[in-house]
Image (spheres, rainbow, N blue to C red):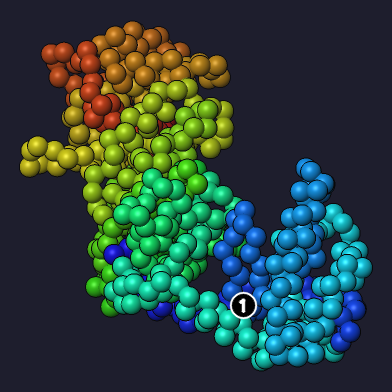
Amino acid sequence: MMLTALNDFARERGLTDDLLYEVKPVDFFIRISAAGKFVTLESTAGEDGRGKPLSIPRLPQRAANIAAGFFADNPKYVLAYEKGTPKTKAGGVEKRVARLEAFLKPVREVAAETKDPEARAVEAFLSNEAERSKVLAARDAEEWTGSELLAFVVGEATVPVHQNPAIRACWERRSGEKRALGRTARCLVTGLEGVVAVTHPKLKNVPEAQPAGASLVSFNAPAFSSHGLEQGDNAPVSQEAALGYVLALNDMLRGTEQRRFRQGIQLGDGSVLVFWTRASASEESLLLSWMDPTEEDLQRFAESPLHGLEPGELDDHAFYAVTLASNAGRVAVRDWFVSSVGEVKRNIRRYFDDLRIGQAPAKPIPVYRLLKAVEAPSGRGLSPDVATRMLGAALRGQPFPRQLLTSALDRLRLPPSDDRFEREQLRLRVALIKATLLRLPRSGTTPLEVSVSLDKNNASQPYVLGRLFAVMERLQGAALKDLNATIRDRYFGAASRNPVTVFPRLLQLSVHHASKAAENGRWLERTKGEVMSLLPSQRPFPPVLDLEAQGLFAVGYYHQREAFFTKREAPAPGEPDASIS
């Protein structure tokens, strides 16, 4: 079903309108005379430094194999170019010659068949090593990368040779003949009879995959074959359908100026979620701006926070999402699901409502920021599986992986860095804790309630203990000012796991701190008393808090801490302002 949906996407968006040609940025035209002599190397780069997009004969699939383009290709095939010094001179020369011969062979055949003057000019140029060397000398050696796309122009012509009608006719006829040689079978994707793709094109830009691309469907070893079948015959997919699903994914995976993926969300270092709809490109762009907002998106949402998530005419259209990752040279599917645009909108809205915490304005939070906030200080992020399940749960409206709660709490127990973004990082971690708590499955019928900001009436023991810890931290700061290490640095982990071992000692210290904090001390002592009055008289400090209770502790701590940061509208007479100067 997934490949069918991708192939349908490619057809609906016009990606398979012409299976024999593709649009690529041609970097240079090699202008030659009618006799095949080099004239000049013309750059097609625009103001953005990119080559001119042109329709060229579709380039073949290749990795280590040698497969040449048709009248357009890179310098390795067109000029026998090799960057640097080959490891073995003989081997390097042989490969360069083989590439050139592979490119020259169809040119010779077309020139002999059509007698076309432009084809003959290209053949003469390619057969002359001295003329080819002039092209390489037209630029500094360090400027050549080997990946430039080159095409030919003859004489004063303005149209490249590969767009010559006679040469186009040859390309189309040769492609049809080659396709007719393949085995036909009923395609598993379309259900129609077609020529089976022996190998499938490769996906580009999948995180941590080979730069040349990696296959989603491949049978390249006996262990992957069955019943004596080889390669694509094991799962017959027509050449058109194989190209269709790859074109669809590559279109969504390609980068833009604003994003690494045009229509994808990176999950950690090793996987990406791509999605599409049966609605419209504008609807997809809107959903992406919510799921993975850029800075421009965040500014726009500040003016219209709910823009795009209201019910719309296309809400009953299908929504598809697949998470891809590199796996031993292939592309693996980590997750796949189908929903509707309207359902996904509702789930996204709930997702951001669940994440909202404190007084910060409601706005989308990029997924990568959330995941980055809870990764270990060593830089090791969450496992790809957890990141995949987390975003999948957000889109489906399901519980988050419990491991998110563990990771966020572990990160909170470490001393905060001196980074000026620490306050924002704390907000993201606690926001993730809050959202995870709200979504945890429960045996009872009453869901857990966790407020957005400080709830002075919440008498949940873990929540109150978190508030109390924040008050005592504030008392310490008011009394001792500049500190090398606060009680949060030293005691947060123990206080949130085993309150009875820490809180009695912290209460004694808080009395000492209150005596040094002058006016602020008296006000904070009153606040401490109000908070403590919510604790049970018997066993106010439990010996152990389970994982869920530790999460509530963190939320209570954050709520109380943020209340100190928030400027109150009208402090009572004689009562100091709680905001931080």
Tag 1, which secondary structure? strand
The amino acid sitting under disc 1 is Pro
Could you tell me residue 158's position as x and y percent? Answer: 78, 88
Question: Where, by quadrant of the figure, is residue 138 drawn?
Answer: bottom right
Pointer 1 residue: 57
Q: Residue at x 32, y 11 (%)?
A: 502
334 sits left or right of 397 in the view: right
* Residue closer to the observer: 275 or 221: 221
* Residue closer to the observer: 565 or 422: 422
Could you tell me residue 125's position as x and y percent? Answer: 85, 76
353 sits left or right of 387 in the view: left
Give the answer, above or below, for where 142 lies relative to 450.
below
Give the answer, above or below, for where 154 lies relative to 567.
below
Q: Residue at x 62, y 57 (%)?
A: 65
Q: Residue at x 25, y 26 (%)?
A: 547
Pointer 1: residues within 10 angstroms few (<14), some, or many (20+)? many
Could you tell me residue 369's position as x and y percent? Answer: 47, 44
Give the answer, above or below, for where 459 lies relative to 568.
above
Could you tell me residue 446's position as x and y percent? Answer: 10, 41
* Residue closer to the observer: 343 or 215: 215
